[in-house]
Each structure stands twice: as structure tokens, then as C-alpha cells.
Image (cartoon, helix red, strand yellow):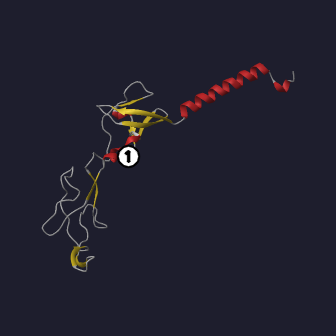
Amino acid sequence: MNPAEGNPGINKLARAIQGQVQRNTDAHSALVLDFGVIQADYSLLTNTYPKPIPKADYMVCRQLTIGPTNYILTKTQDIGKPHSGSHIHNTIDLTDSMGGAVSGTVGEATGPAPDPPNPAQQTAGGDGADGNHQHHVLIPEKMRKLKPGDRVLVAWVQNDAVVVDLVLPATVL
């Protein structure tokens, strides 16, 4: 036996130990995806962890906290005046396809209108006698915040569970 080769049995054992250490390191540092369900108390029950994770002990991605369906996502505003609700309307004369005059509006500055109740009952804010109004974009069902019973995609980042998004059946396509 050549002394430079060492002991073949010890070398084989060292390679086996090194391989096991590498597999353990990979398993504990890898990002693992999982499915879960939001429980009635907003705890998270995942497929790979047998106990519900309390709401305070897991994280969610920002888009899952926007709000419930039909609440206001955004509304019109003047440039540089956040939450003003006002926008431009002017009365102009237009010609319809038959050559007749039609009255329309674009470009007249209006003042802010009050916010509608939240959730909004319609997509536009309260109309005033002077034409003051807002247009609201409501949160659609597919963008709503999490609620009990939701099936979710969970990313395990070491020991932390992070809810990434809602998981829907392909039948919604």
C-alpha cells in the first residue's frame, strides 16, 4: 500500500460521512414549497407540518393583505394631490357619426368629492351638484386578502413559513 493513498477503508468512511453532511446541509438550507390552508382563527396548517401555525408565527407576502373584495383599491386624483379625488372635465361639442352635434365632457377642473362608504356600493364616488366625483377601482375577488378556508402556496425559508399566494383550481381559467 502506498502511504500517499492512505487507508482505503478510512477514505471510504470519510467520503460517506462527507456525503451525509452535505445532504443534511442541503435539506436544511433549501427553499421548500408546500401547500397549506388558512384556518378559522387565521392559523396556517401546511401539508408538511402537522400542527397549525399561529397567525403571529408565519408571514404573508404583501399582496395578500390589500383588503377584502369590493373595497377600494385606488381612486382618481389630481397629479401631486394624493387622495384629492378630483380630475379634469370640460364641456365640449362633438360630432356623432351621423353628423349631429353631441355634448360631452372632458377637461374641467373639479373639487374633491367625499369618499363613499367602505366597502363602496359602486365604482364611482358621490356625485355633487357641480359634477364633483371620484372614480374608484375596487379590489377584485382574485386580488383579495386571505380568509379562512383559502388554499395557499407556502415557501419554507429555513424554519419560517411564508404564504406566497392563493392557490386556485385550474377551472377558474
Dot 1 amino acid type? Arg
Q: Is residue 69 above or below residue 77?
A: above
Residue 11: horizontal and vertical position, in percent?
Answer: 75, 23
Q: Please give the name of the residue rendered at 20% of the width and 70% of the height, measured from the top-left corner.
A: 110
Q: Is residue 72 above or below residue 110?
A: above
Residue 39, image quadrant = top left
Instruction: From the viewer's perspective, tell me whether residue 53 is left or right of residue 118.
Output: right
Q: Residue furthest front?
A: 98
Instruction: From the viewer's perspective, tell me whether residue 130 is left or right of residue 68.
Output: left
Residue 69: horizontal and vertical position, in percent?
Answer: 27, 46
Residue 161, image quadrant = top left
Is disc 1 placed on a helix, strand or loop?
A: helix
Badge 1: how crowded within 10 Å, few (<14), some, or many (20+)?
A: few
Quick one: 81 or 32, which is closer to the camera? 32
Q: Please give the name of the residue rendered at 71% of the width and 24% of the height, measured from the top-left corner.
A: 14
Quick one: 18 or 61, which is closer to the camera? 61
Quadrant location of the N terminus in the rendered image: top right
Quadrant location of the C terminus in the rendered image: top left
Q: Please give the name of the residue rendered at 27% of the width and 64% of the height, measured from the top-left corner.
A: 77
Q: Please give the name of the residue rendered at 58% of the width and 28% of the height, measured from the top-left corner.
A: 24
**Disc 1: which residue:** 62
Q: Residue furthest left?
A: 129
Q: Residue furthest right?
A: 2
Q: Residue furthest top?
A: 9
Residue 85: horizontal and vertical position, in percent?
Answer: 24, 63
Residue 89: horizontal and vertical position, in percent?
Answer: 24, 72
Q: Is residue 118 above or below residue 1?
A: below
* Count of marks, rendered view: 1
Instruction: From the viewer's perspective, tell me whether residue 136 is left or right of residue 130.
Output: right
Residue 6, image quadrant = top right
